[in-house]
Image (spheres, rainbow, N blue to C red):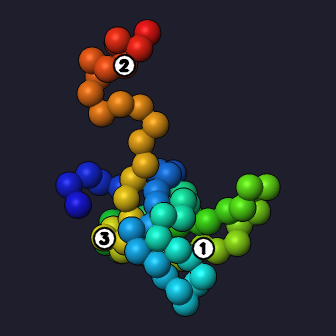
Amino acid sequence: MSEAIRLLDVVALTSCIPEYGLDRGQVGTVVDILADGQAFEVEFCDRAGRTYESVGLRPDQLMTLHFDPAVPELMEDAA
C-alpha cells in the first residue's frame, strides 16, 4: 500500500472477515494505530452510530476512502 493510513481515516475492508461477521466493503473508522503502523484498530458502527465491532487489522486488509477528487484541478472546475 502506497498511502499511509492515519488516525480517524474512513476505511473499507478489502476482504471478508467471517470470524467477526464482516464483509468485504464494510466501512469503518481507524480509532487507534497499533504496532508502529503495522496494524490498526478499526471500529464498525451501524447507522445509529452504535459500535457493533472493533477489530485490529493489517494495512493490506483496508483501503482508505476519499471524499474529494484525487486531482486538485477537478476541484477547481467544480467550483
Q: Position of residue 20 (x, y in %)?
A: 58, 84
Q: Residues within 10 Å of mark 3 (few under 14, many from 20)?
A: few
- Looking at the image, tell me whether mark 3 or mark 2 is earlier in sequence order: 3
Determine the image quadrant of residue 44: bottom right
The C terminus sits in image quarter:
top left
Q: Residue type at mark 1?
A: Ser
In space, the residues marked 1 and 3 are separated at their CA atoms by 17 Å
Residue at screen point 47% across, 51% down? 9
Secondary element at image label 2: helix
**Sequence-wise, which precedes: disc 1 or disc 3?**
1
Q: Are marks 3 and 2 in contact (CB under 8 Å)?
A: no
Residue at x-position 30% and y-position 33%: 70
Nearest-to-viewer mark from 1 and 3: 3
Q: Residue at x 43, y 49 (%)?
A: 65
Q: Is residue 55 above or below residue 51?
A: below
Under tag 1, what secondary structure?
A: strand
**Dot 3 corresponds to which residue?**
60
Earlier in the chain: of badge 1 and badge 2, it is 1
Residues packed near mark 1 inside 10 Å, few (<14), some (14 to 19) or many (20 plus): some
Question: In this rendering, does residue 51 appear at all?
Answer: yes
Q: Amino acid at mark 2?
A: Met
Q: CA distance from mark 3 to mark 2?
A: 29 Å
Residue closest to the far left: 2
Which of the numbered marks, if any, corresponds to residue 54? 1
Tell me the residue at 27%/17% (across/down). 73
Examine the rendering and report whether any part of residue 34 can be seen: no
Counting from the top left corner in percent of width and height, residue 4 is at 29, 54
Q: Is residue 67 above or below residue 26?
A: above
Q: Which residue is mark 2?
A: 75
Disc 3 residue type (three-letter): Asp
Residue 51 located left or right of residue 20: right
Q: Residues within 10 Å of mark 2 (few under 14, many from 20)?
A: few
